[in-house]
Amino acid sequence: MKALKQFSIPFTGLKLGKHQFDYEIDKSFFDAFEYSLVKDGALKVTVELDKQETMLILHFHIWGTIQLNCDKCLSEFAQPIELKERQIVKFAEDELESDDLEIVVLNRKESEIDVSEMIYEFITVSVPYINNCDQAGDGQTCDPVMIAKLEKLAGSTANEEEQHEDPTWAALKKLK
């Protein structure tokens, strides 16, 4: 995770109030995460850190495109995303687990926070459950050659099923 060092924000030297951090995300970001659902993208991230006495409030604004594969025709397409998220960071003497997904608990001795995993999770959660070229919004449609092949294969399997009908069932159909 050394490649993601720039996503570490040292908050101990910051004054109380709001601070802004800007990042650009590309293929190298997603390569740092093993088994990543998203392999490539061109995204911009703005993190607004609101430092308070007892906690940090992080506001994330992520926008751009991620590369996905169509579930129907397998071609790659650019899926635009834009999302705004909030994360609260509280401090404790020992690191406790929080039940609330919006709250992260850090040890008081920590001097920086790594936002790379938070950004990665926000992007991954924004990926649609079903990926289709049509949802990209740029007029792109599925690959017509691949769709024609799929329709041809779907039609041939239906014909094969009719031709290779089990004779046992044919005898039972005569009983109707």
Image (spheres, rainbow, N blue to C red):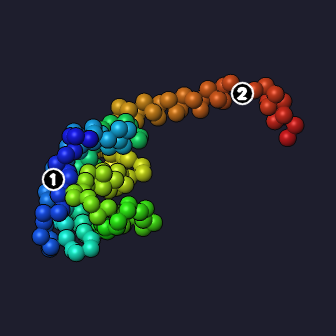
> Residue 124: x percent and y percent?
34, 51
Q: Quadrant of the N terminus?
A: top left
Q: From the image, tell me which residue sits under label 1.
A: 23
Could you tell me the amino acid type at mark 2? Glu
Q: From the image, tell me which residue sits under label 2.
A: 165
Name the foreground residue: 26 vs 54: 54
Q: Residue at x 14, y 73 (%)?
A: 17
Name the foreground residue: 3 vs 138: 3
> Residue 162: x percent and y percent?
66, 30
Q: Residue at x 27, y 60 (%)?
A: 109
- Which of the 4 image quadrants contains residue 165? top right
Name the foreground residue: 113 vs 140: 113
Distance CA(mark 1)–CA(mark 2): 61 Å
Q: Is 164 located above or below residue 7 in the figure?
A: above
Number of numbered markers: 2
- Which of the 4 image quadrants contains residue 28? top left
